[in-house]
């Protein structure tokens, strides 16, 4: 199988994705989080002209880049600005009832993390936005400045598993308004020992990003309905990057297995190789789970 990657984006575990997916040249596939098109290119490269790839994303900038990257390979694809949780509506519009495989690569794309203006990274000062879809919804600064102290603590505890959530929430509450990345970073530094600051900042930023984009609810909605749209023998692959996502996927796969609808192909989540981790640091926290419809 051929894998084509972009010099600006390295997809996570591409070999494992293709190995589990077992692309049918004339099959129909969904990349529910197409981003810059790393995995989409790998899938599209293994489709014949009779095959079809549907890519979904809600980030305008990513969609433009993905379309350009895929058009170099073939034209038998369609990119739609929609959340992956709304994929049934897109399939209906395209007249597709079922597909041979669905892939989700959750969390941030390299484009979002490297952006110096969207507030995803605590390394770059900018407005605290964190929205995947910049034309819809409230941003991180609005959530931080409108929420009660207990709501702030709950966001950080439940979405970031941050033990210092109540202390950080108290300091945020006392120093509002918080508008910029460095405003939040400064508060976290005051609440955290130097040797724990980076991990704490990563958890806090993750928690507000999840809250802004309603990420866990979107995943739950998707997991409730994906089986209906897979053909018999169709594969579902989900790559997650933190325990909250992985837990949802694990439990939904378990329920689907108990009901006899799917067979789990990964008894334990697949992790990236040491070699891949050395090349792509983002892959270090990635966990891949796969199941097949029976």
Image (spheres, rainbow, N blue to C red):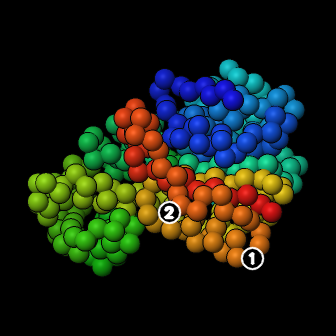
Q: Which element type, helix, strand or loop, lies under badge 2? A: helix
Distance (Cα) linking label 1 and label 2: 22 Å
Label 1 neighbour load within 10 Å: few <14, some 14-19, many 20+: few
- Quarter-wise, where is residue 38 in the image? top right
Q: Residue beneath label 1, please?
A: 259
Would you say residue 148 is visible in this rendering? no
The image position of residue 143, as x and y in percent, is 37, 64
Q: Secondary structure at mark 1?
A: loop
Comparing 249 with 273, the one in front is: 273
Q: Is residue 148 above or below residue 62?
A: below
**Residue occupying the point 44% across, 64% down:** 243
State left or right for residue 156 relative to residue 292. Answer: left
Q: Which residue is mark 2?
A: 245
Residue at horizontal 32 percent and vertical 45 percent from the top: 121
Closest to the observer: 154 or 228? 228
Position above or below: 25 against 143: above
């Amino acid at each position: 199988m051929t894998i084509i990657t972009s010099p600006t984006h390295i997809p996570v575990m591409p070999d494992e994705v293709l190995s589990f997916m077992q692309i049918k040249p004339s099959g129909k596939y969904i990349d529910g989080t197409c981003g810059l098109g790393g995995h989409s290119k790998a899938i599209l490269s293994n489709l014949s002209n009779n095959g079809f790839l549907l890519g979904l994303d809600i980030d305008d900038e990513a969609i433009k880049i993905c379309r350009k990257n895929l058009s170099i390979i073939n034209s038998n694809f369609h990119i739609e600005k929609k959340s992956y949780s709304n994929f049934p509506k897109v399939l209906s519009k395209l007249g597709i009832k079922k597909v041979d495989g669905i892939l989700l690569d959750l969390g941030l794309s390299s484009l979002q993390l490297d952006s110096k203006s969207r507030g995803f990274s605590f390394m770059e000062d900018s407005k605290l936005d964190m929205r995947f879809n910049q034309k819809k919804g409230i941003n991180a600064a609005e959530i931080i400045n409108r929420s009660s102290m207990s709501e702030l603590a709950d966001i950080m505890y439940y979405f970031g598993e941050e033990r210092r959530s109540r202390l950080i929430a108290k300091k945020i509450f006392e120093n509002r308004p918080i508008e910029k990345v460095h405003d939040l970073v400064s508060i976290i530094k005051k609440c955290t020992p130097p040797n724990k600051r980076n991990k704490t900042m990563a958890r806090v930023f993750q928690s507000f990003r999840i809250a802004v984009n309603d990420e866990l609810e979107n995943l739950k909605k998707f997991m409730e309905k994906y089986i209906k749209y897979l053909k018999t023998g169709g594969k579902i692959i989900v790559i997650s990057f933190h325990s909250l996502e992985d837990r949802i996927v694990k439990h939904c796969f378990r329920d689907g297995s108990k009901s006899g609808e799917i067979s789990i192909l990964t008894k334990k989540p697949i992790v990236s190789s040491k070699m891949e981790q050395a090349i792509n640091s983002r892959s270090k926290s990635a966990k891949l789970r796969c199941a097949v419809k029976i």
